[in-house]
Amino acid sequence: LKMPRISLVGSRDLNPKNVEFAREAGRQAALQGFTLVSGNARGADRTAQEAALAAGRNPEEILLCAATKMNDAQKVQQAIEKVLPEAENLRNAEVSSEEHPLVKSAYLADNGFAVQVQPVGFGGGISMMVGVDMDGKVLGVQVISHTETAGLGAVAGAATSAGQAFRDSFVGLLYPVSVSKDGGEADTLTGATITSRAVAEGVNAALTCAKHLSKEAQP
């Protein structure tokens, strides 16, 4: 899409005044030639989308985020396969957000767990998947997305030997995990202590979640 793009972000539960505002914003965006970036979420997003459609925008010029969400789902699936290889009988696991605030999703298989967590690094949230075996050891760490500094914290998720070595330094560790800067066994990225600690925090959150799920799975 080469046209200018715009998105409207707001509450899922709109009062009548805000419904009208979102509707008019979507309509004006369409009339002025903008591509409305929408994920079809209930509330402001969907209201603006429907108004843009009513004003003449084609569906393919609006549902841009549908492809993005599909790509995100594919990245999550790929991350699961990397941190929990040869997983059999993989299924979703219910996790309390109050008890495990960093956990975004969790999956249980016959050979372990895959837990998606999002700690906060130097540049923002770091979405990552952590594989944990039935003995509570880290099987693998995969960074799904991040906004860390290029050449520094971004190395944590890089498809390079340095990035892989950093992630692999967590493999085989038990809770609690810490980086070498704090006296732990996992590596600390050069010039990116905050990022390194955030990844360790995410791994610890995943290990805690996996332990909780393991207890629930016991007969």
Image: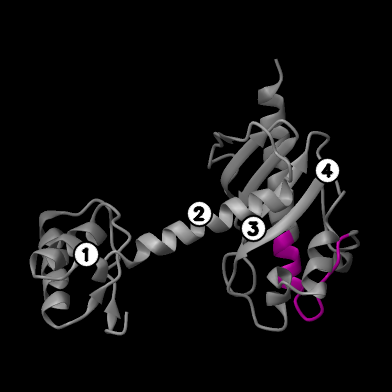
Element class at badge 3: strand
Residue 1, image x, y percentages = 32, 79
Give how far apart the Cα atoms at labels 2 and 3 are.
Answer: 13 Å
Residue 113, image x, y percentages = 69, 39
Residue at the extreme top: 219
Q: Name the residue under label 3.
A: 128
The residue carrying pointer 1 sits among few (fewer than 14), some (14 to 19) or many (20 or more) residues within 10 Å by Cα, namely few
> What's the amino acid at mark 2?
Ala
Q: Say whether disc 3 or disc 4 marks the residue closer to the N-terminus.
A: 3
* Observer-nearest of 67 and 175: 67
Left or right of residue 8, residue 97 in this image: right
Q: Name the residue under label 1.
A: 59
Nearer the viewer's eye, disc 2 or disc 1? 1
Color style of the picture:
one colour
Give the residues in magenta: 186-199
Element class at badge 2: helix
* Observer-nearest of 2 and 27: 2
At 25% from the left and 76% from the top, the residue drawn is: 35
Element class at badge 1: helix
The residue carrying pointer 4 sits among few (fewer than 14), some (14 to 19) or many (20 or more) residues within 10 Å by Cα, namely some
Give how far apart the Cα atoms at labels 1 and 4 are.
Answer: 47 Å
Q: Mark 4 points at which residue?
A: 137
At 23% from the left and 57% from the top, the residue drawn is: 46
Residue 58, image x, y percentages = 18, 68
Left or right of residue 11, residue 123 in this image: right
Q: Mark 2 points at which residue?
A: 73
At 70% from the left and 15% from the top, the residue drawn is: 219
